[in-house]
Image (cartoon, rainbow, N blue to C red):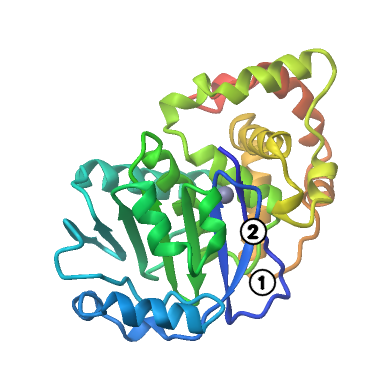
Amino acid sequence: MQTGVDLHPGFPARFAEVCCAVNFHFLKSFVVCNVTEVEPADMMWCSSGTWLRTLLSCAVLLCCVPAFGRDRWVVQEQRGSLLMYSEFEVDTERMWAELGEVDSELLEATGIRATAGRVEIVLFASRQSYLQYLSASVPQAAARRAIFLKNGEISQIYAYNSRSLVVDLRHELTHVRVHQHLPYAPLWLDEGLAEYFEEEEAARPRSSRREAVRWKARVGISPTLSSLERIRSAESMGAEEYRNSWAWVCFLINDSAVSRQVLQNYVRQIHRGEAPGRFSEYAAAENSDVLSRANSYFRKMTFPLTFASSEE
Ligand SMILES: [Zn+2]
């Protein structure tokens, strides 16, 4: 999966950040409504016409989880701060379990913690329905399977029913958590984490990206962190850049307790509002040996259950 988000630290907070699945493009959306006042019960009273007119009157406006009618949502469930609206029957228990797994793994691996901010997950029965709903306000949706928007404490994920729905939701929720926890995030880290956690733990060793990274590393072509750090927008990222970002996150989480700790320390500094600079420079200063292990890791691309098993 290829995704995109542009994280310009200086971008006004009143602009929402948008990330989407299966696209390299990004979008900054102007949000003028205060969604915090809208409760689910009230959302269901929003008429489609009203909502869409509002959307069209703004650059992009996602002021509530809307409804074209009371019967639109077959599923309306809440689990903590997560709310799910779906046009089709969903195995919600599995979805909550998958999303809960993302939260717990993210916390354990990186220290990124879910906040109490509301996350509205809106699922459409078909791509057509998804496009009808979003195309007027978010034209970029046409090239995407899922979209993440954020405005203050409110995050929204839009997706549609497909074989990759679980992967899409895991990917977008990772972005939600990254953006809840951090005032900004390097693009390679944001996308690398989303790519990493979109797959269930058991599926990672079988990832199609793994063999590509291993094969290239074995012929002397390893992902270069400094080149990823120079990328300024998701528009500049192609499949290789997304795969390489994923590979670097794999390395930092799985190579050793030391590499994971360096990543966690970096995340903690950003969370505190500090400016640790580029990760490559930060990591070299923290532990001069940690980055030197990367090429060795890329030749193996292992996903150990314990750190001990990855130690050489
Ligand atoms: Zn993404």
Report the residue marked by disc 2: 26
- Badge 1 local density, few (<14 within 10 Å), some, or many (20+)? few
Q: Which of the image's four quarters has the C terminus?
A: top right
Label 2, residues with CA under 10 Å away: few <14, some 14-19, many ≥20: many
Residue at the image point whose x is 39% and y is 52% from the top = 159
Which residue is depicted at the point 14% across and 64% down?
71
Number of labels in the image equals: 2
Residue type (three-letter) at the residue carrying disc 2 = Phe
- Choose between 210 and 288: the one closer to the eye: 210
Upstream in sequence: badge 1 or badge 2:
2
Tell me residue 266's x, y (percent). 68, 54
Circle 2: element type: loop
- Examine the rendering and report whether any part of residue 111 can be seen: no
Residue lying at 47% horizontally and 47% vertically, measured from the top left: 145
Q: Give, as a three-letter code, the residue at label 1.
A: Gly
Position in image of residue 74 (x %, y %)? 16, 56
Q: Position of residue 41 (x, y in %)?
A: 18, 77
